[in-house]
Image (cartoon, grey):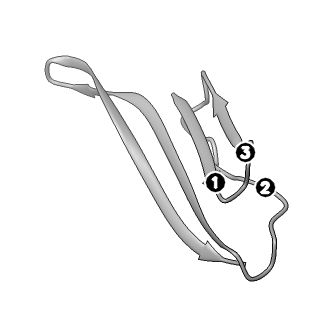
Amino acid sequence: MTCWTTISGVSGNSDNHADIPADYLLHSSVAIRRGANYSLRSRCDFKVMTDTGPTPSNVVTAIDFSA
């Protein structure tokens, strides 16, 4: 599994990891300003076994928050 994460409003913040185990807990830690709005976006790509074999799949997470 491969995952990446970005946080808009935080310049230069991105994270990308390959070969993550299936039980990985996606997390993010960054210094932010109070009173600002942010958007955290994550995507994990992986393969799911189907009756025709491994099939590319993904999960996308979007979280909008204010500090």
Q: Earlier in the sequence, mark 2 or mark 1?
A: 1
Secondary structure of the residue carrying numbered label 2: loop
Q: Around disc 2, counting alpha carbons within 10 Å, would you say few (fewer than 14), some (14 to 19), or many (20 or more)? A: few
In front of the other: 50 or 62 = 62
Marks 3 and 1 close (CB-CB < 8 Å): yes
Marks 2 and 1 close (CB-CB < 8 Å): no
Query: Which picture quadrant has residue 45?
Result: top left
In the rendered image of this protein, does residue 60 appear above or below residue 34?
A: above
Q: Around disc 1, counting alpha carbons within 10 Å, would you say few (fewer than 14), some (14 to 19), or many (20 or more)? A: many
Image position, residue 19 (x, y; %): 60, 22
In the rendered image of this protein, does residue 63 appear above or below residue 66?
A: above
Could you tell me the amino acid type at mark 1? Answer: Ile
Q: Is residue 37 left or right of residue 33?
A: left
Residue topped by disc 2: 29
Q: Earlier in the sequence, mark 3 or mark 1?
A: 1
Residue topped by disc 1: 7
Extreme residue toward the left, this view:
52
Image position, residue 27 (x, y; %): 68, 52
Could you tell me the amino acid type at mark 2? Answer: Ser
Secondary structure of the residue carrying numbered label 1: strand
Residue topped by disc 3: 13
For the residues marked 3 and 1, what is the alpha-carbon distance in whole angstroms? 6 Å
Q: Which mark is residue 24?
A: none
For the residues marked 2 and 3, what is the alpha-carbon distance in whole angstroms? 10 Å
